[in-house]
Image (cartoon, rainbow, N blue to C red):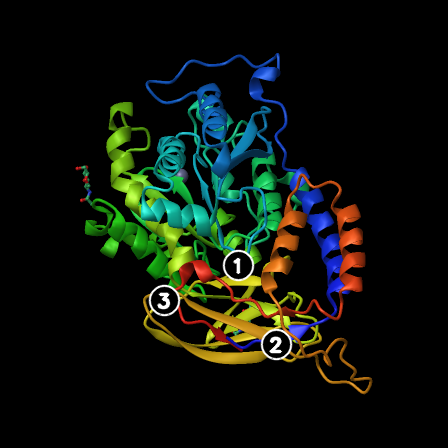
Amino acid sequence: MNSSSFCSLPLIAITYSCLLYLVSARVGEFTPGRRLLDDAHHKPSINIEGYMSNYELENAIMAFGERCSNISRIYSIGRSVNGFPLWVIEISDNPGREEPEPAFKFIGNVHGDEPVGRELLIRLANWLCDNYLKDPLADMIIKNVHLHILPSMNPDGFALRKRGNAKNVDLNRDFPDQFFATNDLEDARQPETKAIMRWIRRIQFTASASLHGGALVANYPWDGTEDKKKEYYASPDDDAFRFLASVYSHSHYNMSKSKEFPEGITNGAAWYPIYGGMQDWNYIHAGCFELTLEISDCKWPNASELSTLWEYNRMSMLNLVATTVKTGVHGRVFSVDTRTPLPAIIDINGINKSVKAGRLFADYHRLLVPGVKYQVTASSPGYKSKSTTIFLVEEATTADFILEPETNNAGKIVGSGCDCSGNYKNRLEMVDILAHPQMEISMVIIVALAFLLLLYRRKLCLSFPKHRQALGSKRPTVV
Ligand SMILES: *[C@@H]1O[C@H](CO)[C@@H](O)[C@H](O)[C@H]1NC(C)=O
Ligand SMILES: *[C@@H]1O[C@H](CO)[C@@H](O)[C@H](O)[C@H]1NC(C)=O
Ligand SMILES: [Zn+2]
């Protein structure tokens, strides 16, 4: 591991404190609002033929949050047309705290009359909680991923037993479209759609999947074509998408054995083109690799089949989430002079799609097909881009980048003259404290810390971090 040091810690600490203060403030906006029951005009409905009613689903989410509070956080991303909160379960060993880890989201019940997903997602959450510290895959996911689960995006449609929301709008046609100006009016969009869009802008998801019913296939972008023809329309990441979809179909009980869809996967436009879909928007605007999963031939099967459907999909769901850690190239991007994380983008030679590094830690998680050589480039405004070539084996690869400022006449680099080494852990711990949303007094602490560190400035210089130690089998490169 390439190791060097820096000395401008107090400055960094203050910068961090401002950043983190903003981050905690943002997290605060997610805090749960009133529950449905608190609204007098809503009456709890009884369960529908063995499926949880919206009221029961809400109770199941709250019960999960209480039972598994050590690994979860419950929050709402908004409300449906009829005022039902759109509850999300976040599962992680550090829920609600930003970490240099991929985030994954599952969205169920996009279409009101496709309720299998919402039931399976509650089972998924409970399975992870029950198997934490027992099952290696549950452990791996909880420790290395922030998994966000929205069991129902369309509770109103569910209550009405129909596809669209309460305003009869198909939510999977309500997103802005890349080819047609269908949903360009922000205000005309449904509250459920707006909630998802806000969510995606706040949390940087590496990948995601929405759950549907009516077929058995893993569908990947593009969903729409430029000329409205029904034909295979490949996105820049077609290979990675086919790989992800295959992870799902081949981990499934029998999805990959489909006669209609080879390998149990399909390009959306090749099946039937749609416009204003959620998956294309995710990939285009957030670099989030989203699949649309059709998980049962029957949209509303008998509730007695739910346990079987859960068993058929369990490994698929787990393996899909795990893929965001187990494959691809991951790392962080730092500035050579201050060792601070940089607002960077990552490009892969030959793939016309950039992926952004995280805002706080400058961590990136770039999904790629294994068994191929890639040239990875990190760029940040005001810095010289750097590239490295990796051969991606089955396992994920780590490549951290240390970028140098673009040279100018002034040319003096702060802190570059220092030559000492120490322990990066100190800094990480400090960041951890600050990242905690409940630390309202972080500003005060940080000013005090900065002052103390200023006093020890000559002794306290920190070495470059060793990233992603938890997954020790990988050989990291620093570029
Ligand atoms: C998968 O199994 C289910 C249940 O046995 C069956 O109804 C369905 O037709 C099968 N699908 C495929 C593609 O084999
Ligand atoms: C890359 O993608 C952008 C849209 O994201 C497009 O405008 C551009 O023409 C593409 N470049 C190439 C070389 O295909
Ligand atoms: Zn659907």
Q: In the rendered image, is residue 436 in sight?
A: yes
Picture layout, residue 340 above or below residue 116:
below
**Hey, which quadrant is residue 239 in on the image?**
bottom left
Residue indicated by mark 3: 369
* Separation (CA) of disc 1 from disc 2: 32 Å
Residue indicated by mark 2: 4
Q: Position of residue 130 (x, y in %)?
A: 36, 34
Picture layout, residue 303 above or below residue 41:
below
Q: Secondary structure at mark 1?
A: loop
Q: Nearer the viewer, mark 1 or mark 2?
A: 2
* Separation (CA) of disc 3 from disc 1: 16 Å
Q: Secondary structure at mark 2?
A: loop
Numbered tag placed on residue 277 in the rendering: none
* Separation (CA) of disc 3 from disc 2: 33 Å
Residue flagged by tag 1: what amino acid is it? Gly
Q: Nearer the viewer, residue 83 or 424?
A: 424
Residue flagged by tag 3: what amino acid is it? Val
The answer to whether residue 302 is left or right of residue 174 is left
Q: Position of residue 138 (x, y in %)?
A: 36, 44
The answer to whether residue 359 is left or right of residue 241 is right
The answer to whether residue 293 is left or right of residue 443 is left
Q: Which numbered disc flags the more N-terminal residue, 1 or 2?
A: 2
Q: Which numbered disc flags the more N-terminal residue, 3 or 2?
A: 2
Q: Position of residue 456 (x, y in %)?
A: 76, 64
Q: How packed is label 2: few (under 14 Cα within 10 Å), some, or many (20 or more)?
A: some
Residue indicated by mark 1: 287
Residue flagged by tag 2: what amino acid is it? Ser
Ligand 3 position by quadrant: top left
Q: In the rendered image, is residue 184 in sight?
A: no
